[in-house]
Amino acid sequence: MALLDLEQQFAFYGAYHSNPTNVFIHILFVWPILFTSQTILYFTPSVLSSGFLPHVLVLNWGFFGTLFYALFYIALDKKAGSFTAFLTFLCWVASSFLAKALGFSLAWKVVLAAQLFCWTGQFIGHGVFEKRAPALLDNLAQAFLMAPFFVVLEVLQSCVGYEPYPGFKTKVKARIDADIKQWQEKKQTKHS
């Protein structure tokens, strides 16, 4: 699977997220997972020093992870990717202030609780509503790198009809339907 092929990647994601309740659960929980990951990464050592940022914003692994995510999202799609990159950096700034305010001894507990809650919600979404294992079992990059972008793209499609290019939604829907059909046939063959 080509990493920067948005249509292929979004169709793969969509095949694992076709149930509306599961989609809603992901919309609720994907970004808190990213935010809390950034919160705990605040405590990694500084890689570069900067005199131009407020002292709470540290150029550490949390920053560079955020930068990587942001650039990747922009490479996938200029408009939605730029918006998602902005949200990613906004989360990094907010998580840095939260981490600084909480301190490590409390922050890791908050992060652990939030991560457990959000991941449990997502697994329930897949097991109870989607009735399909999560995509992370087949593609870790989907789960950790692309999920925040795809949640934003899904919301933009639903709320404002956004398409990265004309016909995107139709092409992706056809791929999703074919993938789900293939998965159901494979599942049926296993149970026969």
Image (spheres, rainbow, N blue to C red):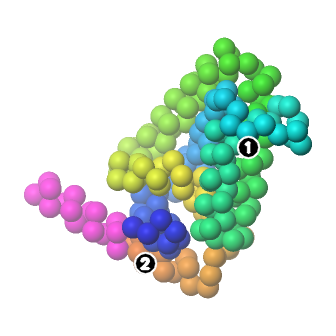
Relative height, residue 144 to residue 151 (above, below):
above
State yes or no: discs 2 and 1 in contact (Cβ < 8 Å). Answer: no
Q: Quadrant of the N terminus?
A: bottom left
Task: Tell me the quarter of the picture where residue 94 sits.
Answer: top right
- Disc 1, SS: helix
Q: Specify few, some or many for label 1: CA neighbours under 10 Å numbering under 14, 14-19, or 20 or more.
A: many
Q: Earlier in the sequence, mark 2 or mark 1?
A: 1
Which residue is found at the position 75% from the left and 49% from the top? 89
Relative height, residue 110 to residue 168 (above, below):
above
- Disc 2, SS: helix
Magenta segment main secondary structure: helix
| Residue 74 in view in this figure | yes
The reply to whether the magenta stretch includes residue 182 is yes
Kind of residue at badge 1: Cys
- The residue where tag 1 is placed is 91
Which residue is found at the position 82% from the left and 40% from the top? 50
Q: Which residues are magenta?
A: 178-192
Kind of residue at badge 2: Ala
Front-most of 127 and 112? 112
Q: Would residue 69 appear left or right of 186 to someone viewing this image?
A: right
Could you say where residue 33 lies in the image, as x and y percent from the top left?
Answer: 59, 39
Q: Which mark is residue 168?
A: none
Q: Quadrant of the C terminus?
A: bottom left
| Residue 94 in view in this figure | no
- The residue where tag 2 is placed is 174
Could you say where residue 126 lies in the image, as x and y percent from the top left?
Answer: 42, 47
Which residue is found at the position 57% from the left and 60% from the top? 150
Q: Would residue 54 appear left or right of 40 to someone viewing this image?
A: right
